[in-house]
Amino acid sequence: MDQPKTASAVVIGGGVVGCSIAYNLARRGLRDVVVIERETVGSGTTSKAAGGIRVQFPTETEIRFSLEAIRVFERFQDEFGVDPGYKKIGYLFLLSEEQQLRAFEPRIALQTRLGADVRLVTPDDARKLVPALRVDDLIAAVWGPGDGLAGPAEVTAGFARRARELGVKIIEGVRVQSLETAQRRVSGVTTTTGAISSALVINAAGPSAARVARLAGVDLPVHPRRRHIFFTEPFPAIPGPVPLTTDVTSGFYFRKELEQVLLSPGDVEDIGEDFDVPMDPGKVEDAVQKAIQRVPIIGDARIAGGWAGLRPLTPDDHAIIGWAPGVEGFFQAVGFGGHGFQHSPATGRYVAEWLLDGKPSLDLSLFDPGRFGRPRAGGGLKVDAE
Ligand SMILES: Cc1cc2nc3c(=O)[nH]c(=O)nc-3n(C[C@H](O)[C@H](O)[C@H](O)COP(=O)(O)OP(=O)(O)OC[C@H]3O[C@@H](n4cnc5c(N)ncnc54)[C@H](O)[C@@H]3O)c2cc1C
């Protein structure tokens, strides 16, 4: 496809976030939206996601993002003509320390108040849900039966397909090399195939977000960190479906994927921000050790393969959504960490509202790009789940 010379909006990045934003802008009637993707649609970190969707977040804004995602995934096939493989398998968090329990209790209250079905259950209840679990050292578990999973590739393809039908130009194999600004206002981008003038540029570059922001002289604390996922050979000894089960103390999580078991050591590692993320075979041992601690029978399974991807993390684990400080016309939708897939439907909707109505219908101040460096209240236990 030929690259146009002008656009009403240029979205940098054709991952699940960029495609959702482009779709929502076009659905709301904006014409001449262009997405620039240096590889192919959905081939970035979106292709590495485990597909998990949970309402079990600590803040009202994020819980509302998840509830919006569930609404979209439930009717995705009708709206996008693509089966997203959406299944409510539930999320189960295993707690072994008092401090974890104290941190989870107010979250469960908030999630319940917002209409989510999340319950504190006993270790024995957890074993009824997942009979292979070792529970003797647990003090409780948190069960969200409405949580689940969907296919990141299918969802991204659905957004991209409808976006194209609505007139969005998605240009693949082309990289944004520079951002043009005049008097601290964006005037366009220059790609490997030429210039596009546009008064609105949206950074949806996933793990490369900080590099893209620097093109306009903006510092963004988006730190890509590697995480591994491994899968076993078919393993009928753990019959499916299995909720996405996270051991909060070790970070290990697993679930069933068809006949195989999918497992992650919950690793967080700085290896830079290259597109190709190498897998470290040494992490297999880490994953298996943590797995055997929690699910002893996994010791009988054989690891058949795995992959690694980058999670674009921020210092407070919340995304960055809003105008870049100091550069007019440069919008950020980045830093989604381990939950960018599930929050992509809400991100697309609220970003489109913000850009077309002047303000989103949900308060997004949690994601304010200017918040870093300001003192913030709270903090509390970090639960590093997908
Ligand atoms: C192992 C793992 C498991 C995960 N599991 C889950 C999960 O269960 N649930 C969940 O919700 N999330 C999960 N995530 C997180 C999720 O994958 C990300 O948050 C999400 O995919 C981010 O989407 P994105 O569109 O912002 O990024 P990307 O998919 O990386 O898209 C950004 C795109 O920008 C392009 N780009 C970058 N720079 C340029 C440039 N200069 N010019 C043109 N194009 C450019 C890239 O090629 C890329 O395709 C997981 C992540 C990992 C690594």
Image: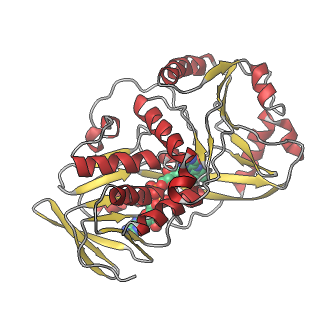
Above or below, comparing residue 267 to residue 164 in the picture: above
In the displayed structure, 147 sits above or below 218; it is above
The residue located at (50%, 46%) in the rendering is 72
Which residue is at a point 21% across and 48% down the rendered structure image? 325
Residue 272 in view: no
Q: Nearer the viewer, residue 253 or 274?
A: 253
Residue at 74% across, 39% down:
290
Locate residue 269, reporting x and y percent: 55, 50
Q: Is residue 73 above or below residue 309?
A: above
Give the image location of residue 307, x and y in percent: 66, 59
Count of picture labels: 0
Query: Could you tell me which quadrant the N terminus lies in?
Result: bottom left
Residue placed most toward the observer, 241 or 340:
241
- The image shows residue 289 at horizontal and vertical percentages of 77, 42
- Residue 11 x %, y %: 34, 63
Q: Relative to residue 234, is residue 177 drawn left or right?
A: left
Of the pair 177 and 81, the residue shown nearer to us: 81
Can residue 217 be seen here? The reply is yes
Quadrant of the image occupied by residue 53: top right
In the picture, measured across the screen, residue 183 lies left or right of residue 97, that is: left
Q: In the drawing, does residue 74 fall left or right of residue 239?
A: left
Question: Which quadrant, please, contains the C terminus?
Answer: top right
Residue at horizontal 33 percent and vertical 36 percent from the top? 362
Name which quarter of the figure residue 154 lies in: bottom right
